[in-house]
Amino acid sequence: MSEKNILAEAYKKTSNKAPGHGPRNIQVLKEAFMIIDGEMESEMYGKGQVIDDFQAKMAKYLGKESAVFFPSGTMAQQIALRIWCDHKGINKVAYHPLSHLEIHEEDGLKKLHHIESILLADKDRVIQLEDVVGLEEDIACLLLELPQREIGGQLPDYKTLEDISAYCKDKGINLHLDGARLFEILPYYQKSAEEVCALFDSVYVSFYKGIGGIAGAILAGDKAFTDESKVWKRRHGGDLISLYPYILSADYYFDQRVGKMNQYYEEAKEFARCFNQCHGVSTKPSEPVSNMFHVHFDAPKEEMELILVSIYEETGIGLTSYVREVNKAASNYEVSIGDLYSQLPKEELSKVFKLLDEKMKAFKKS
């Protein structure tokens, strides 16, 4: 058995887990369906009251004229960028070097839509106004991911967002929001979803990250844009005969959790402070700007797995099921705070960080 599997198995056996909302098992769907009338009609091929009502609800929440439910954010975002490229007659879009479209989608945007990506900013920081102003090529659309997940969930300040939005509007560049974690950043900005989305021409949000639904996404904008997106959704095979399991779970967990985002945010900051007090451990950002952040260890992956397994066995609290190699001397993992954190026994959690500090000091001395 590999060290990775040893850590995952030890994590599974813990009685309390720090991140997330709980296991992604069938109970997630069962819970969402408990209050649903079994006689309710499902939607068919993207039409029906179930999908219409939810789309209208999300359009209102995001402050957009119209919204469309998609089975995946990958599909929704590629379609959004294709529409803006067609409108402008320019097959170029700009985004961060570590955008999901660039590193996790097998070049779908390029292979399926023949759209060229222009990478903005250094990979270790967020896009700033000067990066956009300094573009040397014409683009149809700029995509901003808020927060920038691959660098710990960092965010530009709100004034920067406003300035980028104004610049794009002045230059005729469409601005698209990769808001997979939009709900999670609202407490930091102290803005409503409507206020943030007003800066963008189109918006994507996810329902299985901070919200914790089964799957699915919303793409929102003006009606002409969303009408066009429905045609592309059909072309992509996104109009399954029924999407209601995704829609009903998205709706249920949205209502359950969107109001808890400030709680998750404050708990993430508390959790990060605990890590930052340990020897050889730091978080990125040092103070989280949403419910997610990265934990960095000054120890190699294999060593950290053994340290964490021993902590899990002694305390019964699991921090993570995996650790990634950064280089031969460092490792990290990603944290997302959800419902489980508030249920942790605080005395045992304090013991976790006492042990982590001691073991990291011992490792450095060895």
Image (cartoon, rainbow, N blue to C red):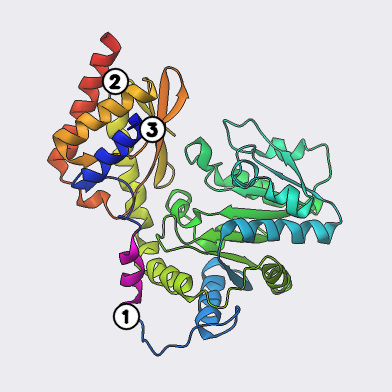
**In the displayed structure, does residue 2 sit left or right of residue 224?**
left
Name the image quarter holding residue 310. top left
Which residue matches tag 3?
323
Which residue matches tag 1?
35
**In the displayed structure, does residue 60 sit left or right of residue 90?**
left
Is residue 201 found inside the magenta-colored segment of the image?
no
Point out the tag, 3 or 2, that comes first from the N-terminus. Answer: 2
**Quarter of the rendering occupied by the N terminus:** top left
Q: Which residues are magenta?
A: 25-34
Please identify the dominant SS of the magenta region: helix
Mark nearest the camera among 2 and 1 is 1
Mark nearest the camera among 3 and 2 is 3
Instruction: Give the camera-side residue of 340 and 324.
Output: 324
Visible in this render: residue 199?
A: no
**Quarter of the rendering occupied by the C terminus:** top left
Which residue matches tag 2?
279
